[in-house]
Image (cartoon, grey):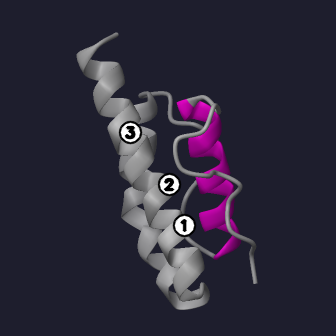
C-alpha cells in the first residue's frame, strides 16, 4: 500500500511541489497519471489530480482519504487565490 502524500493542509510547500507529491502518490496507487508536471501549468496539474483522486477510495482508509481530499481542496483554494491575486 502506498503511503499518504506528505502534503498537510495549508503548508508552506509550493503548489508545484504539492502537485508533485499528489502525482507520485496517485501513481503509486496505480492511477494513470504522469509524475511530471504539466507544461500547461498548475491548473492543468490540479485538473489531472482531481481526475484520478478516486483511486484513493480503493486503497486508502477513511483517515487517508480525508487527508488526501483536504489536501486537494487546499490546493484549489491556493490556486484560486493565486489566479485572483497574482
Q: Place residue 17 in its image quadrant.
A: top right
- Disc sitting over residue 84 in the figure: none
Residue 20 colored magenta?
Answer: yes
Q: Are marks 2 and 1 in contact (CB under 8 Å)?
A: yes
Under circle 3, the secondary element is helix
Residue stretch rendered in magenta on the structure: 15-29
Relative horizontal placement of residue 46, taking residue 32 as reference (left or right): left
The residue singled out by tag 3 in the image is: 44
Residue at 66 percent of width and 50 percent of height: 21
Mark 3–mark 2 Cα distance, whole angstroms, equals 16 Å
Comparing marks 3 and 2, which lies closer to the viewer? 2
Left or right of 1 in this view: 86: left
Under tag 2, what secondary structure?
helix
Q: Is residue 27 above or below residue 37?
A: below
Please name the residue that numbered disc 2 is placed on. Answer: 71
- Direction from residue 50 to residue 12 in the image, left or right: right
Looking at marks 3 and 1 on the same chain, the residue that comes earlier in the sequence is marked by 3
Q: Report x, y in % for residue 62.
A: 52, 86
Residue sitting at x 51%, y 35%: 38
Residue topped by disc 1: 67
Residue drawn where x is 56% and y is 71% of the image: 31
> What crowding class fits label 3: few (fewer than 14 Cα within 10 Å), some (14-19), or many (20 or more)?
few
Secondary structure beneath dot 1 equals helix
Give coordinates of residue 42: x percent, y percent: 44, 32
Amino acid at each position: 500500500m502506498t503511503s499518504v502524500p506528505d502534503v498537510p493542509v495549508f503548508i508552506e510547500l509550493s503548489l508545484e511541489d504539492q502537485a508533485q507529491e499528489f502525482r507520485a502518490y496517485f501513481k503509486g496507487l496505480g492511477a494513470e497519471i504522469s509524475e511530471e508536471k504539466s507544461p500547461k501549468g498548475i491548473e492543468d496539474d490540479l485538473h489531472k489530480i482531481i481526475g484520478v483522486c478516486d483511486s484513493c477510495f480503493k486503497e486508502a482508509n477513511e483517515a487517508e482519504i480525508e487527508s488526501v481530499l483536504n489536501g486537494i481542496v487546499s490546493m484549489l483554494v491556493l490556486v484560486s487565490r493565486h489566479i485572483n491575486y497574482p
